[in-house]
Amino acid sequence: MKVLLTGSTGYIGRRLKQRLIQNQDIDLRLYVRNKKTLSQNLPSNIDVVEGDTFNKEKLKEALKDVDTAFYLVHSLSRNDYKNLDKQSAQNFLDAAIECGVKRIIYLGGLGVKNEQTSEHLLSRIETGEVLSSSKNIQTIWIRAGVIIGSGSTSFEIIRNLTEKLPIMTTPKWVNTKAQPIAVDDVLNYLEQSIYLKEKENLIVDIGSEQLTYKEMMLETAKALGLKRVLIPLPFLSINVSSYWLNLFTPVQFKVAKALIEGLKSEVVIQNDNAKKYFPKIHPISYIEAVKRAVKEIETNQVISRWSDTDNSGKIWDRNHDKEIADAIFLDRKELLLKDLSKEQVFKSFTSIGGKDGWFAFDFLWEIRGLIDKMLGGVGLKRGRKNQYNLSVGESLDFWKVVDIKENERLLLYAQMKVPGTAWLEFKIEDNKLIQSAYFYPKGLFGRIYWYSLIPIHYLVFNNMIKSIIKKAEKF
């Protein structure tokens, strides 16, 4: 069976990709914006087509000879995501019909249309409606609410708030009901949807027990062995709540606001199709899902994270090598490797950030991260998925990995709020470690920003390259 997977670098897609690769019944093809974001260990028999859902010719190339196509595309990071999502879905549907695809499987969100439905949830519903609008192709529309797994947006928010705040003042929407579900159960439903015998369009609502968001936080505290007190305050506005999430969790303000707006609507199961069509799948409880997620984090087994996806395409539409060559400002440091191997030094600079921090002057990085959070940026709290391995497309604190070459180079693109564009590069060349900070300023303020940071850069970057060499000696 020929299966196309879109969104294979996203949170759900990356995990589903691993499952489908191991499925001997499936001939898998991936449709990605940028091939560099795929693992270098991808089996050679996996077909990859590069493009997006707004490139109709590439869509046809990707969907050619496909039996079943997974649609796991969402554009929340774009300002006009609602219209873009509808157009993207229509393009995909049209191309799938033209190519003779038999089935589309779409993962959307639980919820119903009413005056309280958030724009984010409404967009997910409308996407499903577009994909289900034709009689010429079958669509299996799986609808999930709060997905609990290591690295999921919902779990990271709940976990961070629960761990950091013994007493929480919360908005009244924490009493809204939802039906969370473990990420592994979501993957079970998606994979088994390939084999359904049904020929008509289906909407399948999935979830475990009904809980309020308050109950979820208290259950999370229980799973973590903590005691927490929640005090709902009816006057907390959406903006205030969004800033609260922005400061105390890894998500940035725009994402936090979209999620807070969604708390006004109940996201509970509206049909029993999950039991009817998937009788062998029995979703685990919420607390068990939390325990599994925590164990994955503690054992460094996190497969995917919400922050490792760039739905906007802005990062991958750039020619980073050309842009850093054109950068106006440059801070470059060099040190000889001496008796150290390239492998030692590469391992040292690719373990930077996250829990291990940025060597000395970590407090300066923390201050910069806090300022970034207050400005609505991503801050440092995203950390990194794995402290020992990196791949293109992953988040590293407020950087994004845009290029990595084994024992040679690591290029990071700045995602913090800056008046311009910035990169940080580590490169091994001619028995030297070359550390370069590039900056392309935007207007006069960008230039003032760079010059004002020269003393701090001198301290931080000088220490950083020396510390990288020193750490490399331990490997």
Image (cartoon, helix red, strand yellow):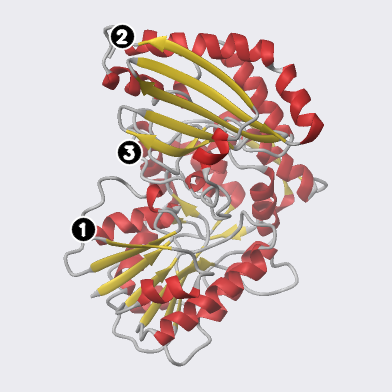
Mark 1 — residue? 22
Front residue of 140/148: it is 140
Q: CA distance from mark 1 to mark 3?
A: 18 Å
Quarter the N terminus occupies: bottom left
List the single residue furthest toward the left: 24
Q: Helix or strand or loop: what does disc 2 sit on?
A: loop
Quarter the C terminus occupies: top left
Q: CA distance from mark 3 to mark 2?
A: 27 Å
**Crowdedness near tag 1: few (<14), some (14–19) or many (≥20) residues, C-alpha within 10 Å:** few
Q: Residue at x 73, y 40 (%)?
A: 243
Mark 2 — residue? 473
Mark 3 — residue? 301
Instruction: Determine whether 89 is above or below 459 in the image.
Output: below
Residue type marked 2: Glu
Pointer 1 or 2: first along the chain: 1
Q: Residue at x 59, y 68 (%)?
A: 85
Q: Is 68 displayed left or right of 7 in the figure?
A: left
Front residue of 254/344: it is 344
Where residue 335 sits in the image (x, y, percent)?
42, 10
